[in-house]
Image (spheres, coloured by chain):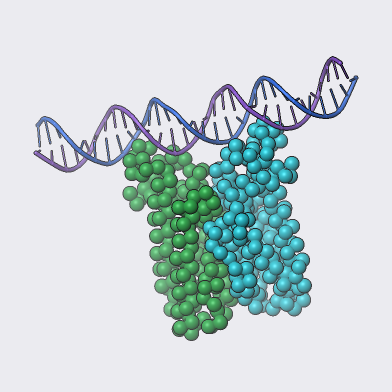
Chain colours: A green, B cyan, C purple, D blue
Amino acid sequence: MDTALDGAIRVFCERGYHATSIGDLTAAMRLATGSVYKAFRDKHAVFLAAFERYAAVRREQTRNAAARGANGREQVRHVLLSYVEHSQGSEGRRGCIVVGSAVELSAVDPAMRARVTAQLKTNESFIAGLIREGHADGSIPRHVEADDTARLMICLTQGLRVVGKARLPLNGDRLVGVAMRLLA
Amino acid sequence: MDTALDGAIRVFCERGYHATSIGDLTAAMRLATGSVYKAFRDKHAVFLAAFERYAAVRREQTRNAAARGANGREQVRHVLLSYVEHSQGSEGRRGCIVVGSAVELSAVDPAMRARVTAQLKTNESFIAGLIREGHADGSIPRHVEADDTARLMICLTQGLRVVGKARLPLNGDRLVGVAMRLLA
DNA sequence: TTTATTTGGAAACGATCATTCCCTATTATC
DNA sequence: GATAATAGGGAATGATCGTTTCCAAATAAA
């Protein structure tokens, strides 16, 4: 089932919700029409399940990236680097289902909007926590305000996905090098 | 005609391309179906015209915002402030047609992708130019690299539109205050 | 006034969409 | 081994989409 959902994630990321037909879904999930409707109530339910799985995987990937840093500052740096990497290449061109949901659905689908904001806030407070760790371990100056800086970094990460989907090249080292000035 | 296009912009921003039906368009443009097809070849042509007009208006608004600054650094600050303002409130909830096109169409529509990247690059080099002005007038230190910083700021602005569409509150003064550290 | 010409509006069309229904294997139960 | 139950696949269905076509009204020309 997860392998089928991975296929759904792939096609939903690439084309978004409305441009993905049931035919696209059955092809990507390697399931027949009837089987999809046996497992999910409707297309919206497939999208919701794909979103949940995608968000969970991405949360874990972000936490793994942070774990590669030795202090708060380095942890933030690795999170940003991870975001740039995921916004590039084939995955970057495919796109992010969270950004896609925010842009395509949040205006007309309160349930999806709630999940988008939840994911954004989770990541935001995770980054704010890393900044506070940096305060504690001395790697980030105290005058760097955690909450505002974290919200700005969330904007940055979501923007990376947009720019990456438009296929502008993103140099991880240089962009993150510039972004780290926010922690100076 | 421009007033009709403004209606099209409104509905395309809010719902995106695929979720906007011809019925939505005729209502928003205050035109009957036949009249829309008399003025445009098809739905895609309406979207393209709406995109062009939106992009031109936004370019001018961004340049007007920059003109409010007395030096390079202040000009960048006003551009960022302008983006936060446009990403908030009813306009922020409505969304940006450039971001929408990047997310919804750039994967499958090369013509639209080209226009998205053109708009991003135009804004990027505009910001880079402002930073170089700051270099010249002494308001921005020379060690602030213009191109990379400008690209990062483009990511930031596009991310602001995503986060604003998800209806997270954005405090302009505080966010821009944090972002201005990039020019320190 | 009458006749072209143009503009706006609504019904009609084929195509495609999401969804349902039914049939066929396959597995589990007795 | 026979039967019941379940899961998967694909054709049928009603609705909606984008598009076309035709008609009426208004304007300009004669």
Q: In the drawing, does residue A28 fall left or right of residue B67? A: left
Return the x and y of residue B64 as percentages of the image width and height: 75, 62
Residue B50 versus residue B22 in the image, above or below = below
Residue B57, quarter of picture: bottom right
Outermost residue, bottom side: A138
Q: Residue at x 43, y 40 (%)?
A: A22
Q: Residue at x 35, y 37 (%)?
A: A34
Return the x and y of residue A133 as percentages of the image width and height: 45, 79
Q: Residue at x 45, y 65 (%)?
A: A122
Residue B47, quarter of picture: top right
How many labels, in total? Answer: 0
Q: Quadrant of the C terminus of chain A?
A: bottom right
Return the x and y of residue B54 as percentages of the image width and height: 69, 51
Could one spot residue B143 in this view of the protein?
Answer: yes
Q: Nearer the viewer, residue A92 or A58?
A: A58
Could one spot residue B182 in this view of the protein?
Answer: no
Q: In the drawing, does residue A83 fall left or right of residue A7? A: right
Return the x and y of residue A180 as percentages of the image width and height: 56, 74
Q: In the drawing, does residue A132 fall left or right of residue B42? A: left
